[in-house]
Structures are given as structure tokens and as C-alpha cells.
Amino acid sequence: MSIRSAFTLLLAALLLSACSGWQLRGQTSVPSFESITLQGASARLRYTLEDLLEPNGVLVHNQSPHVVQIIDEEWDQRTAAVDDRGRAAERELRYEVTWQLIDRDTGAMLNPPRRLTAIRSFAYSPDNVTATSDEEDLVRTDLIEDISYRLVNQLANASRKIQD
């Protein structure tokens, strides 16, 4: 290996290690809370968050001193592309969650409301509605998981700031 290649490799490794907060999709930081209360979340979001938090030692129950309030949870869809006959050929789903962390005892907001948005496109076939419906369900599940990972990471950041 030449000196130039080794130097380039070392520089790339240093740059990647310097990116604080950068994580692969699906990786989460662990909040330093012992427990949280989830309010306002849909069942799918709640169960996904519980599946991410509880194995990492963060219990989800209704008596926690830290309340994660889901202020708004919104789904939107649009036609992203049409075929040569003017029929929908691709759909786009957008999932948006607005959340806030609240201290149960004082009612104080521990962070400003934060919005998380995830968008995915998928092929839509008006001739095969069953397959299209299955594809849409998979995309919805992927969007919920994406938002959940990101929400857990933001909770970890918020918990570190509160603990400091």
C-alpha cells in the first residue's frame, strides 16, 4: 500500500469519527431515563417505541417523571408519478410526528416541540391492488420504524442535556 493510499484512508477514518451524532439507520442511542410515559401516540408508534426502549433498560409506563407527549401524528399521501394512461404509477407516503418532553411534577416543557418527518415512495399498480396494498403496509411500517429510531435518538440527546 502506498503512503498516499494509507494517508487517504487515515484521513477518511478521522473524518468519519469526527461526525458526532452520525449513526447508521436503525442504530439508536439509549436515553439516560429510567422510564418514560408516552402520551398521545398511536398504538403502532407506541409499540414500536416500547420495543426499542425497554430492551435498553428504559421502562414505558404511566407513572414516569418524564412524559413524551406526541402532540401530532399525521399521515399524508400523494401520487408521485403517473403512467402513460394517466393512472397513478408511484405513490409517496409522508409520516410526521411532533413531540415534546414534559416534566410530570412541574408540567414544565423540557424541550421545544420537535417535528420528525419521513417520506417514502413505492410503485403503485392499479391493476394489482392486493400487491400494492401489501407494499403500502410495508412502507408504513418502515416509516414508523424510521421515526421511532429518530425519536429515541432525540430522547437520548434530550436526556443528556437534562442530566447535565
Image (spheres, rainbow, N blue to C red):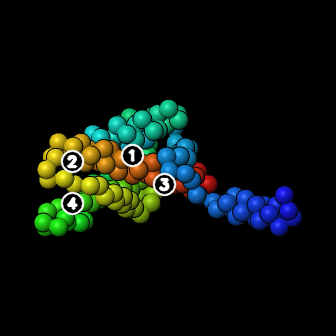
- In this rendering, which labeled residue sits more in front, label 2 or label 3? 2
Secondary element at tag 3: helix
The image position of residue 50, as x and y in percent, is 40, 37
Q: Residue at x 34, y 37 (%)?
A: 47
Q: Residue at x 45, y 39 (%)?
A: 52
In contact (CB < 8 Å): disc 2 and disc 1: no
Nearer to the camera, 83 or 28? 83
Gap in angstroms between the C-alphas marked 3 and 4: 35 Å
Q: Identify the mark nearer the N-term, 2 or 4.
A: 4
Badge 3 crowding class, 10 Å Cα cut-off, few under 14, some 14 to 19, many 20 or more, is some
Nearer to the camera, 152 or 135? 135
Q: Amino acid at mark 4?
A: Ala
Residue where numbered disc 1 is placed = 145
The dot on residue 154 is: 3
In contact (CB < 8 Å): disc 4 and disc 1: no
Secondary element at tag 2: helix
55 left or right, relative to 98: right
- In this rendering, which labeled residue sits more in front, label 3 or label 4? 4
Q: Identify the mark nearer the N-term, 3 or 4.
A: 4
> Is residue 64 shown to the viewer in this render?
no
State which quadrant residue 131 falls in.
Answer: top left
- In this rendering, which labeled residue sits more in front, label 4 or label 1? 4
Gap in angstroms between the C-alphas marked 2 and 4: 10 Å
Residue where numbered disc 4 is placed = 89
The image position of residue 99, as x and y in percent, is 36, 56
Residue where numbered disc 2 is placed = 132
Q: Residue at x 34, y 59 (%)?
A: 119
Badge 2 crowding class, 10 Å Cα cut-off, few under 14, some 14 to 19, many 20 or more, is some
Q: Eyeballing the image, is 82 above or below 102?
A: below
> Is residue 11 shown to the viewer in this render?
yes
Q: Eyeballing the image, is 61 above or below 143?
A: above
